[in-house]
Image (cartoon, helix red, strand yellow):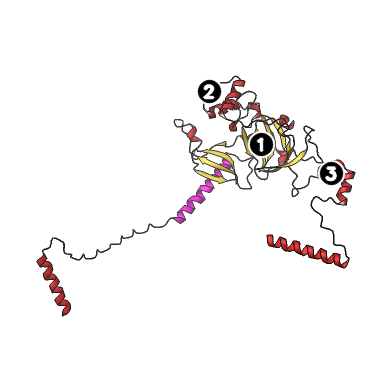
Amino acid sequence: MRTRTRTRARTVVVVVAVARASGRQPLPPPPTHAHTTDANAADANADPSSAAAGGRTQRPCPSCGVGQQALKFSRFGAFIGCTEYPRCGWTTRPRDPAAAEVPEGVEPLPDKAQLGLLPPSSPIAVGSKYAGLEVSLRNGPVGWYVQLGGNVSLELQQQAPLPDVKALKVVEIRAELEKRGLDPKGKKVELVERLLAAEDLWPLVAHKRSSLPAGTAVATLTMAMAERLLSLPLDLGAHPQTSGRIQLRNGRFGPYVTLHAAPNDEEEGDDEQHEAPLAMCSLPKTVSFWDVGVTQAAELLDQKMRRDAKRQGTKKRAPAAPRKAATRKAAPRKATLSKATPKAVRAGRGKAKSEASAA
């Protein structure tokens, strides 16, 4: 590398010397990165604010009005945030050039929209503290989903974000509990649950989330549809023949129904929720996730079980005959003379071997 640099320097010196000897002026050196062109200088004289931003238009934060909108990156992708973070928590998603353009006169859907408050008569609120919590529709890194808990109106004001309670240290959690007059004793899991259940944090924390099934029109989502999503896994009822429980679920590959064993009052408990289903069946495209009932789900499960039984019947074969274990004959062991053999016997045998070899 040094040799190339020296060679280039010598070449430049020689060229300059030849140009001076011939009476010609050498060419000016190329402009460096710090050199400002005439066009940039004109733009800077015309608009000093754009020159300060490197030629980019300044966009003030719509929430605080003090900071500027800036492109930031996280583990979920790129987003636009305020430069005054953490004092201002305003964020938005960048516009996707490949997305379909919104027609004129139609307002684009916001990333966060409130659907309503969960009524006490909802199946989710029965026997829990979820009654009165806000239900909202949100656009996340992997698509649209509904959320139980949180406050969209407060989030749109872009106040300082709530601390991640689970990421706090035990000392910090106990200090927060003491501020609220709660018991600071116990393990970290108990402390986190106790702090999240505080009156000031309970309505602001997300308690449940559920993704929208594929093909769902976001603009037509109602509160009843959101409650159906948040109640997953949803018990549709008992199977007409086996009396097993049929549940509606939504997985990574789409909605599906499962068949579980009939409930037993004596063994009813937490193990019942984690038991393996007896049968599973994905919902075909002709069946609506919002309208499927126990009768239609039972027919789908029966068809799936018949197909599985037929497949297993064709795969059954006659058991193969047991292979005989290969027996290996042991080689005859040669007789060897031990040290206890008398010398006369050894000498006689040695003499016989020598005579046999000589013959």
Q: CA distance from mark 3 to mark 2?
A: 57 Å
Q: Which residues are magenta?
A: 295-315
> Which residue shows up at 59% across the image and 23% down it?
177
Name the mark nearer the viewer: 3 or 2.
3
* Tag 2 residue: 185
Q: Classify the position of the C terminus by image quarter.
A: bottom left
Residue 169 image label: none
Task: Residue 188 in the image: state x and y as whole percent.
Answer: 54, 29
Q: How many marks?
A: 3
User: As drawn, is 358 to the left or to the right of 288?
Assistant: left
Position of 306 with respect to 101 (left or right) is: left
Say which amino acid is labelled 2: Lys
The residue singled out by tag 3 in the image is 51
In the rendered image, the quadrant that contains the N terminus is: bottom right
Quarter-of-image position of residue 162: top right
Q: Would you place residue 354 above or below residue 55 in this image? A: below
Residue at the spot of label 1: 146
Above or below residue 315? Residue 284 is above
Disc 3 vs disc 2: Cβ atoms closer than 8 Å? no
Between 27 and 307, the residue placed more toward the observer is 27
